[in-house]
Image: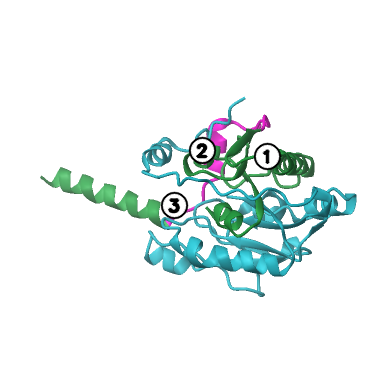
């Protein structure tokens, strides 16, 4: 959504995301999609080659796009056991909203069991 | 290959996202690149909730803990020559370990300085920007903070923006 506001202000934008799904649903001016876990749009720490490769693709899209909404998906592969990768990006403690949902569910269960 | 946006998400979060009632607003805004890349000045923007320790305050996570539907809509400024040890991170929805090891996975200031040296881009602007990505309501971004950041960018002669939602 930031990209849209910048674009309206006369700035050309390109966005690199692990969730191109949102670009499609919300309408983002220019998107590069990568299949990486959350919090890793440009890959792993210290992997300058991958970071630079993705940045160069984004610059190419910025140059070549002729209209809004283009999404280019790159074929980088995240090399990590999937179950491990699903956990690894998550915060060590549940976020406040998740914590609230867990507590609500627990309360509901206790209520049901109490009946 | 098609990127699976849900590959690394737990099933409950994936289902929640798929059912969110969002509306795509048309038309999607589009500003064609005004100049060749080699003459463009770039600003970088991430939603990784990073800040410069001791220079600007961290994002307000205490209020988010009290009000879980609220997320700090403000932004922080990160200079182009920021050093890794100056970076702090307080996103409550991701593990911040990797961005604290290498800011370039979110805000690739090092890579853009290299591209500037190579002459691929005109320049990296003095300032880049960090937001906090957990926003249930983006009205304040849209109405206040994104226009403020855009004005700061224009004040530094920026014409292209590279964004990484976190």
Residue assigned mark 3: A94
- What shade does chain A have? green
Q: Is residue B152 above or below residue A5?
A: below
| Stretch of the chain drawn in magenta | A74-95
Instruction: Name the N-terminal-most of marks 1 and 2.
Output: 2
Give how far across and how far down residue A46 sits, in percent: 76, 47
Residue assigned mark 1: A65
Letter of the chain in cyan? B
Q: Is residue B81 above or below residue A70?
A: below
Residue that sits furthest to the top in the current view: B1
- 3D distance between C-alphas at marks 2 and 3: 28 Å
In front: mark 2 or mark 3?
2
Q: Quadrant of residue B22?
A: top left
The answer to whether residue B55 is left or right of residue A38 is right
Residue assigned mark 2: A24
Of the 4 image quadrants, the one containing the N terminus of chain B is top right
Q: Main secondary structure of the magenta part?
A: loop
Callout 3: chain: A
Instruction: Name the N-terminal-most of marks 3 and 1.
Output: 1
Q: Is residue A79 magenta?
A: yes
In front: mark 1 or mark 2?
1
The answer to whether residue B37 is left or right of residue A65 is right
């Amino acid at each position: 959504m930031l990209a849209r506001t910048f674009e309206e202000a006369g700035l050309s934008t390109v966005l690199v995301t692990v969730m191109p799904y949102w670009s499609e649903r919300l309408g983002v001016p220019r998107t590069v999609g990568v299949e990486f876990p959350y919090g890793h749009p440009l890959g792993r720490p210290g992997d300058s080659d991958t970071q630079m490769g993705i940045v160069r693709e984004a610059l190419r899209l910025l140059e070549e796009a002729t209209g809004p909404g283009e999404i280019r998906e790159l074929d980088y592969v995240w090399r990590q056991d999937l179950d491990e990768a699903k956990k690894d990006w998550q915060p060590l403690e549940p976020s406040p909203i998740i914590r609230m949902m867990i507590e609500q569910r627990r309360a509901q269960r206790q209520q049901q069991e109490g009946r | 290959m098609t990127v699976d946006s849900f590959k690394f998400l737990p099933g409950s979060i994936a289902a929640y996202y798929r059912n969110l009632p969002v509306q795509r607003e048309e038309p999607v805004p589009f500003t064609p690149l005004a100049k060749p890349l080699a003459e463009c000045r770039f600003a970088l923007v991430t939603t990784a909730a990073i800040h410069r320790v001791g220079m600007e305050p961290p994002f307000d996570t205490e209020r988010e803990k009290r009000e879980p539907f609220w997320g700090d809509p403000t932004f922080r400024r990160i200079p182009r020559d920021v050093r890794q040890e100056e970076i702090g991170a307080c996103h409550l929805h991701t593990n911040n370990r990797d961005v604290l090891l290498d800011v370039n996975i979110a805000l690739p200031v090092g890579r853009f300085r290299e591209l500037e040296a190579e002459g691929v881009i005109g320049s990296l602007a003095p300032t880049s920007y960090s937001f906090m990505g957990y926003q249930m309501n983006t009205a304040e971004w849209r109405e206040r903070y994104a226009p403020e950041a855009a004005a700061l960018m224009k004040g530094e002669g920026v014409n292209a923006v590279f964004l990484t939602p976190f």
